[in-house]
Image: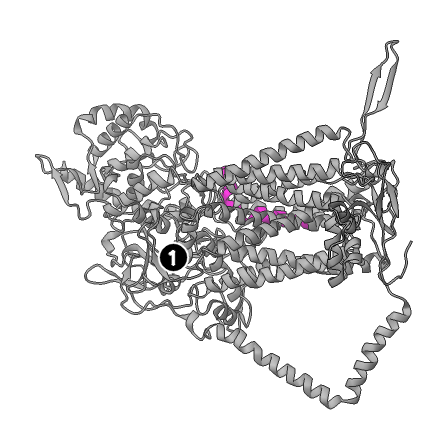
Amino acid sequence: MSSGTENHTPVSLRGLSADDPHLQPAARNPERVEKVIVFNFVLGIFFGLLFIVAYIQNWQPWILGGAMAGCLTLLGIGLIAWGKYLMPRGPFVEERHEFRNTDEDRSAFAAAIVQRGGGLVKRRKLLTGLFAGGMGVFSLGAVFPLLRSLGPMPKGTLFHTDWRKDSYAVDITGRRVLVGDLAVGAIVTVFPEGEQDTENGQAVDQTVLIRISNQDFTTMKGRETWGPQGILAYSKLCTHLGCPVGLYEQQLQLLVCPCHQSMFDVNNGAVPQFGPAPRPLPQLPIYIDADGYIRAQSDYREPVGPGFWERA
Amino acid sequence: MTDVLETKRSKKLAKGPFGSVGHALNELDDRLGTAKGGRTFLDKIFPDHWSFMLGEIALYSFVILLVTGIFLALYYIPSTAIVTYKGEYLPLYGQKVTEAFASTVDLSFAVRGGLLMRQMHHWACDIFVGAIVVHMARVFFTGAFRKPRELNWTIGTTLLTLAIVNGFLGYSLPDDLVSGTGIRIAYSIILSIPVVGSYIGFWVFGGNFPGTMVIPRFFVLHEFIVPLLILGLVGAHLALLVRQKHTQFPGPGKTEENVVGTPMFPVFMAKTTGFLLLVAGVTALLGAFAQINPIWQFGQYHAANISYAVQPDWYMGFLDGALRIWPSWTFHSFGHTIAFNILIPSVILPGIVFGIAYAWPAVERKLTGDNAIHHLLDRPSDRAVRTSLGVTLLAYLMMLFIASSTDVIANFFHVSLDAVLWAMRILVVVVPLIAYPMTYKICKEMQNFKGAGKRKTTNVVSRTTEGEYVSAASPRYVDDIPAHLAPIPVPTYIEEVQAPANDADGNGTRVVDR
Amino acid sequence: MIPTLLKRSVLLSILGVVSAGPLVLFAQSADAVKQPYQTERANSGTPNSDVVKKDANGVVTSYGNSSIMYNAPSPSLINLGRALYMQNCASCHGNEANGVPEGGSSGAYPALVGLGPATINFWISSGRMPAANPRQVQAMRQKPRLSDAQSVAIAAWVNSLAPSYPYIPTPNLATANVSNGAALFALNCAACHTIEGIGDALASNTYAPSLHNIPAYQVVEAIRIGPGNMPRFTGNLSDAQVNDITKFVTTYISHPQNPGGLGLGGLGPVAEGFVGLALGVGVLAIFGFWVGEREE
């Protein structure tokens, strides 16, 4: 039975006798069900009071939460049982009405938009064009403060760290690292002196010093001076997604990134052996000065961290 | 001027047969014209199948999120300013932490009921997204997204996206080690976008990572913008549901032109309010007894720190899994880098998955040529192709989800990590490929098997004293749809019965209504 | 005695470098591969110790400071240690504790000479040695087969062959700062052992073990000697810092404060996801099954 009436008067029965089977509770034994629901509600009230007491007495969170859970769950079960078993069981039916209007109404609606609106555009092309253009310009302009004011232009920030020629390598406490501090198999996280306390400095400059031998070590051609007395310096920023590569397995000679398990071979310039990292960890050229302190020869020779569009 | 004959009884009668409530409703109708619409609303029929409750789980867990969220928002400080923690958790005492972290730890230890609210909020979020996924699956497998409900499907998919995003923003707010790592990963993903990546990254973060702006901005998004969007869309979602009425499974007395079930008032309201209380109760149970996100154990996020065995919350798991198993493909020429190993798993793949979801109603219309209006649902086994495709996609997402726990799996089963990673790479392809024909076959089998998936009644066999066996169907469950009763429209009045002995107020009538 | 020690140490160091180099390169792939145990250790000794005690011969018997004292095992245990060693260790590590050369039946069993008492004590008292499965890539922690006293005795004998550092530590946890320890743990240890200290799987069948219920001295030993694939922290962590970390590990890692309820194994979102979906959505769906109707 579908009707296109604009007011959806529900088709319904005028009257129904109170002892009609549709109006009877679903439960076979409503009195018993009612008793169970009463029990639920009473217990729920008890838990509710327990909640109040637990709060006032500052008892542990699990008592507070457990009381709340008990109260809510019991009241909920009781209410559902009431609705399911004690209320009229039905079933009831309702007619659906077709949504669509008559073809006449549809044409009228379409005509209103197309003829009255479209006509506007046709007759006053210049006006509509200019208005649309004006709104367009404004919308474009509105994007600028919404986006551009949020932050600075990247410029060359991603290409450099704070490591400079002769920067001292310091640990997180600011203490300069001595060559004698590191045994073979050691790892320590270092920063250029002065940057260890800043979050931005930590984020970009984080470097791990690992010692793989007592003799000068060359990881690859052109890096003969970069591994003095077996100490190598690699950027701690994973070239996959920038997690700190702090996991060093000294016998397997692997730096493993804990996030997605990229594995870098420290002997060969931290070339990725496995996992999603695409590039080796950049190696920091370091030297050991006369006092035994570990210092940088220069900044990293390539951008650290994950790849981005401008990275050649 | 009072009537001489005015008594309590006559005053009562003057109010009409429905008493003061009726009087109040009449006053409301004078002002707002609510009588007709109100009655229509109360008579609305809700089909009551249990699978229609899944959407309610999502709705009510959202309500809990709002309520607990308001509580948390009154204590949480969205600031990265550095303070010294002086609270009661000793391993943090004296450490320099951000106000965001410190306020969250204080919420957990110093605010009465704070930890409970925090945990309920986080559990409600996990349940919220889980319920949306399950509800979406139900809608998909029963074909409820078909005409005229495609718009509701679109709104629902958008709600899923917003829920996932808001969850990520929310658990990143405490600025702890685990969620801070997630923010770093998000930053790198933004950076990897070709051409505009570094710009968008710097603008969203107010500079290079980590900056000081990301926590306050996440707070505005999580607390204000996204919940507003969700609220609006949920409102639209429900409005459409009320307007178009709910779908129903085919059955006796049910056609495309009617809805059979329980009326909104009182039955459905009782059940749904009770269910709201239940959802709140179960969330409170989890919040009370199962610890979640113990940020005091993780500590303040520092960019140089990292923990192993760090996974995002479960609904982001499929992205993390995809990132782990994806090979290290990069395009690296002409002075530019395109990190496909990041873009494909974290941008393109979810784009495709959600794109399929958004496009599906149109795709199915095209493929089946079915443009008719459907108010009756399909049984999933009756639509073997659609069900198999859905299961395949879910299997694929499930494999990616499992792939995010590779290290935990390797540790738990004491196998090599490399082996698990390779196994996941293979399973992610093989399992969906197996899932399709398996599901298809099962559906076909179920179609041929009469009564598959239907509730069976048992037979009670008894023996008479003469030794004869008699079998009879067991009594019906009380909450089965009483098919022996034909559905009737909701009555306007419930007729008076003859005045019974207990006519206490002497009206001469007793209107019976439970 | 001392010239022999010097000669031996130099010889072994060179041997170690020469053999460790190529071994390292081959050791990267999967299971049951010979592990290049590093026998050379530079500077894992007495960094800036406030207290150094020597015996009549000028041999250092203990060193340290108010945070940690390192003590050499008593020489009276040497004979007992030798007997225990021959019984339990010699079959793999050789009668003179200088290992079995490569080409043996299942890989190189490392030389123990010159590793220092703390190393020997750590491996035995944590139950990793005697190895339950010598073919396994990484010996896992077990219930110790030898008692602590026996472990110290064996350490005494091995050390007598080529006395070396570090000695067996006794940390003074009363002076430790647990907050400093937590911060250092997050920077240095969490990357392998997880921030909750529950351990996880590393590459190629190696594992970072759980840190629950480990005696304090073993924590110090592990940090100082860098057993297996664990890095070695010597001069880059002072005794006070190691003491802080040890206090943190033996208190808040072993007994985490879980005011929120069940700790769910410290697994974080993995366990939480399971619980949320199975217990949360699952239980509610089951409730929904009760609330709603079923088809006939």
Dot 1: what SS? loop
Residue C142 in view (yes/no): yes
Residue B98 in picture, x, y percent from top left: 38, 58
Residue range of the region highlighted in magenta in the rendering: B393-417
Residue B62 in picture, x, y percent from top left: 61, 52
Residue A149 position (above or below residue A183): below
Q: Where's the N terminus of chain B, which quadrant?
A: bottom right
Report which quarter residue A243 is drawn in. bottom left
For the residue pair B506 and B252, the one nearer the viewer reads as B506
Check disc 1: other Cα within 10 Å, few if <14, some if 14-19, many if 20+: many
Residue C261 in view (yes/no): no
Which residue sits at x=71%, y=56%? B238
For the residue pair C230 and B63, the one nearer the viewer reads as B63
Residue lying at the far front of the rendered structure: B4
Type of amino acid under label 1: Ala
Q: Main secondary structure of the magenta part?
A: helix
Question: Is residue C189 on the magenta stretch?
Answer: no
